[in-house]
Amino acid sequence: MAGNAVDRFWQARRNGDWDSLVAQLQRGVSITMLHENTELSRAEFSTFLRVMHHDASTTIHRCIAGRGHQIAVLATIARPKTTFECAGFYDLREGRIEVVREMWLPRGGASMMDFV
């Protein structure tokens, strides 16, 4: 993957570098968790990611850029007891992420709330 804000964002997730992760987000970032139809603040999203990526192995399967400012990522997050698929859609502005839309699905059909 090239060195844009989404690449740095996902690398920070894989490394547990939460300060670097938050630094990739615009101050007024719009964050929507599509699987729950919920909007989160930067702080709430960072906390969610800390929980989901703790003791996890993250594999990025695809990263697709459209027109340079819209990027889609498909990743697997394997935790000790459960594996999740995450589809993320990101809009960039001025080198940082302005819009985050992610959908998390646990393998096996359970609800995300069973794991958080």
Image (cartoon, rainbow, N blue to C red):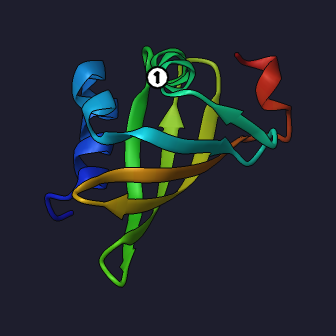
Q: Amino acid at mark 1?
A: Ser
**Residue situated furthest left in the rendering:** 3
Front residue (pair 5, 94): 94
| Residue in view at x 37 percent, y 51 percent | 97
**Residue situated furthest bottom in the rendering:** 67
Q: Is residue 68 left or right of residue 80?
A: left
| Residue in view at x 39 percent, y 73 percent | 64
Front residue (pair 62, 97): 97
Q: Which residue is mark 1?
A: 46
Give x and y (percent) for residue 39: 70, 36
Q: Which quadrant is the N terminus positioned in?
A: bottom left
Q: Is residue 77 left or right of residue 68?
A: right
Q: Is residue 54 left or right of residue 86?
A: left
Give x and y (percent) for residue 89: 52, 60
Give x and y (percent) for residue 5: 25, 52
Give x and y (percent) for residue 115: 73, 18
Q: Is residue 110 left or right of residue 9?
A: right
**Residue situated furthest right in the rendering:** 110
